[in-house]
Amino acid sequence: MIKILNNKSTIYISFIQSILLTFYIFLIGLVMINGNNWFGPMNKTPILGPVLFLTLFILSALISASLVLAYPFYTFWVKKDLGKAVKILV
């Protein structure tokens, strides 16, 4: 994936990152809205709900950070191009 993005402009890369993050947020919202229908109510084990929510929260933070920060980190660390990395983040 990174080799594909090497020749693209910073605007294009930022746009792709924002589209992917929006799609991921949409999927998480869909899971949260339809969770009771898909997985059933959590009446038997009330501790399982908060544990799964916190697990999803941490996993979402990891996925969101990797979607937003992976390519700028690659650009800064491997390509040694601080200007392009900052432009992608901003």
Image (cartoon, rainbow, N blue to C red):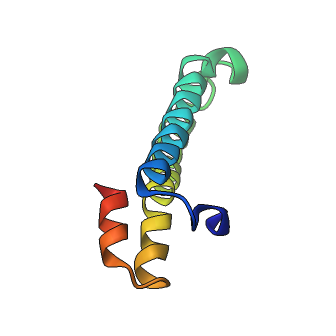
- The residue located at (59%, 62%) in the rendering is 5
- The residue located at (40%, 78%) in the rendering is 76
The total of numbered circles placed on residues is: 0
Q: Is residue 46 left or right of residue 34?
A: left
Depicted 44 relative to depicted 50: above or below? above
Q: Position of residue 77 (x, y in %)?
A: 44, 83
Taking depth in this image into account, of 74 and 81 the one nearest to the observer is 81
Taking depth in this image into account, of 4 and 32 the one nearest to the observer is 4
- The residue located at (30%, 72%) in the rendering is 83
Depicted 8 relative to depicted 3: above or below? above
Which quadrant is home to the C terminus?
bottom left
Taking depth in this image into account, of 75 and 49 the one nearest to the observer is 75
Depicted 10 relative to depicted 29: above or below? below
Q: Position of residue 71 (x, y in %)?
A: 49, 65
Q: Position of residue 65 (x, y in %)?
A: 44, 57
Which residue occupies the extreme top position in the image? 37
- The residue located at (70%, 24%) in the rendering is 39
Q: Is residue 47 visible?
A: no
Taking depth in this image into account, of 77 and 60 the one nearest to the observer is 77
Depicted 1 relative to depicted 44: above or below? below
Which quadrant is home to the N terminus?
bottom right
Q: Position of residue 59 (x, y in %)?
A: 53, 51
Q: Is residue 83 visible?
A: yes
Q: Quadrant of residue 80?
A: bottom left
